[in-house]
Amino acid sequence: MAETTRRAPRRKKREEAFARAQAEVERGRVNDVSAREVTLHASTAHDIKANAVALTQGGANAIDAKTVTINQGGVMEVSAETLNIKQGGVLRAETERVEVTQGGIGVAQAETVTLSAGGAGVILATNVNVDAGGAQYVLARESIQVSQGGAVLMVAPRIELQNGGAVFLLARQVHGNVRTMFDARGAVIFGIVAGVVMGLLARKRR
């Protein structure tokens, strides 16, 4: 029996030799931090390397860790196995799991992405769950589940929507009460019509 081909899981981080066991920064500013556990409160840092990072009301340029928790803070780039964001934001993240609650993320590349009353720009994942949230573009290798949310573009083999919608929706299986402006066929027709209109406008300008 042939085995189903799956994407290789993100490489687990190997144990590193950190500069110290713990690093706590309270209302300060530091450059680079290397510690097994890093805690920042109302503080900023440049680059952080750790096993676990907890950031509250602060910010960082880049974080490389196994577990990252952000509460009312912001980070430019995160590389981790697990990322939890609550009332905060990350510009770009590459992780195994991402959970966003009342926060936002620019680009999320992960195995599982969960949005709860949050937003995202681009999501690239295996499975995506959205509850009262939304994104611009959502592409999943297996499934997308949405409850009271939506996106401009959704692409997945299986999509389930409850009180959700999308402008463009491409899927082999669609379940639930779905609101779309364009399905796969409509998207093609829209593209053709838009091309014709743009061509006519261009001729009139000459």
Image (cartoon, rainbow, N blue to C red):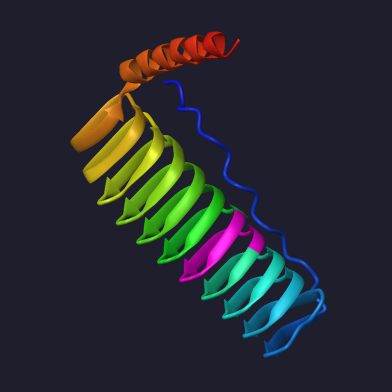
Residue 171 vs residue 199: left or right?
left
67 up-or-down from 109: above or below? below
Residue 65 vs residue 137: left or right?
right
Q: Does the magenta run of residues contain 35?
A: no
Residue 29: quadrant of the picture:
bottom right
Residue 59: quadrant of the picture:
bottom right
Residue at 41% of width from left, 35% of height from top? 153
Q: Quadrant of the C terminus?
A: top right
49 up-or-down from 164: above or below? below
Residue at 70% of width from left, 78% of height from top? 44
Residue at 45% of width from left, 43% of height from top? 136
171 up-or-down from 72: above or below? above
Residue 101 coordinates in the image, percent (x, y): 40, 66
Q: Quadrant of the N terminus?
A: top left
Q: Does the magenta run of residues contain 80?
A: yes
Nearest the viewer among 182 and 200 is: 200
Magenta span: 76-92
Magenta segment's dominant SS is: strand
185 up-or-down from 10: above or below? above
For the image, the number of numbered tags is 0
Nearest the viewer among 20 and 204 is: 204
Residue 38 coordinates in the image, percent (x, y): 67, 80
Residue 142 coordinates in the image, percent (x, y): 40, 35
